Image (cartoon, rainbow, N blue to C red):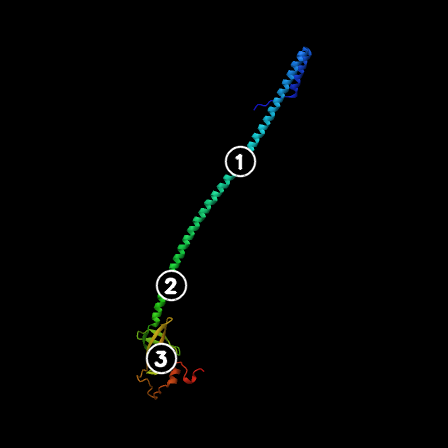
């Protein structure tokens, strides 16, 4: 936009020119000077108005530029936030995918562990069942007595294997048909035992011993009398009738 700048000096020259003409031309020149002065003032006012309009337009243009710059900043901020949110969404999706894979893998491992535990339980149950069957099964042993004590007998079987037999108050121990304590058995005599496996140990149910002389008595000594009921209970580790707890 072209701007007009009319100064007071220009106006003064116009006025001076008009006055000079008035002096030379008399009253006729005076009217021409007044007309010129009016025209100069009109031009001055027109130029002032043009300058004001130009300033106003310039101010509007600057405001528009500021508004555009503000909108551009807001747009840039919005775009930056949008990009950041998009990256966060992508990261969240990746994390969710990894979590899903980890959960799936953990579930598969837990299922495999459960299957292993189940199989182990089945195997242990079967093994326990076999042990129970072995405990309840009565087995026989024949051989020579190697040693005897209150709680154990050591027997060499016919297959020459040595076995430890556990005896208790429930074990029936007979020598030549008579009940005797385990400590009375002498090494070298023939024994036949029936036993069961309890906790992996052979527990004797019944021991039948036969003296080497076949009669079960010492030929130089009389045969002992058969024990009465009280003696049998004592030999079996049970209190007699007069020893029952009150």
Closest to the observer: 164 or 4? 4
Q: Quadrant of the C terminus?
A: bottom left
Q: Quadrant of the N terminus?
A: top right
Residue under pointer 1: 71
Give the farthest residue toward the top.
25
Pinpoint residue 150: horizontal percent, then vertical percent.
40, 79
Position of residue 17 relative to residue 66, above or below, is: above
The residue sitting at 48% across, 43% down in the picture is 85
Horizontal arrangement in the rendering, residue 224 relative to residue 96 (left or right): left
The residue sitting at 61% across, 26% down in the picture is 52
Closest to the observer: 62 or 128? 62
Residue under pointer 2: 121
Closest to the observer: 72 or 155? 72
Question: Label 3 crowding class (10 Å Cα cut-off): few <14, some 14-19, many 20+?
Answer: many
Residue under pointer 3: 172
Question: Label 2 crowding class (10 Å Cα cut-off): few <14, some 14-19, many 20+?
Answer: few
The residue sitting at 42% across, 50% down in the picture is 100
Evaluate if marks 1 and 3 touch, with contact meaning CB atoms under 8 Å apart: no
Pinpoint residue 41: horizontal percent, then vertical percent.
64, 20
Question: Marks 1 and 3, how far apart in space?
Answer: 109 Å
> Does label 3 or label 2 sit earlier along the sequence?
2
């Amino acid at each position: 936009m072209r701007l007009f700048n009319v100064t007071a000096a220009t106006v003064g020259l116009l006025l001076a020119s008009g006055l000079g003409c008035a002096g030379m031309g008399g009253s006729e020149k005076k009217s021409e000077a007044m007309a010129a002065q009016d025209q100069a003032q009109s031009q001055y006012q027109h130029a002032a108005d043009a300058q004001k309009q130009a300033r106003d337009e310039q101010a509007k243009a600057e405001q528009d530029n500021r508004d555009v710059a503000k909108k551009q900043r807001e747009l840039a901020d919005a775009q930056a936030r949008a990009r950041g949110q998009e990256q966060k969404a992508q990261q969240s999706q990746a994390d969710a995918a990894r979590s899903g894979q980890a959960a799936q893998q953990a579930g598969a491992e837990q299922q495999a562990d459960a299957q292993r535990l189940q199989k182990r339980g089945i195997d242990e149950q079967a093994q326990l069942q076999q042990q129970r069957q072995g405990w309840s099964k009565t087995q026989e042993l024949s051989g020579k007595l190697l040693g005897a004590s209150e709680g154990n007998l050591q027997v060499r079987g016919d297959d020459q294997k040595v076995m430890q037999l556990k005896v208790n108050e429930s074990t029936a121990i007979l020598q030549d048909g008579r009940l005797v304590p385990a400590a009375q058995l002498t090494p070298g005599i023939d024994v036949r035992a029936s036993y069961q496996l309890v906790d992996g140990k052979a527990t004797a149910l019944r021991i039948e011993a036969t003296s080497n002389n076949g009669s079960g008595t010492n030929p130089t000594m009389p045969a002992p009398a058969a024990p009465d009921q009280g003696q049998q209970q004592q030999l079996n580790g049970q209190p007699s009738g007069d020893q029952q707890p009150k």
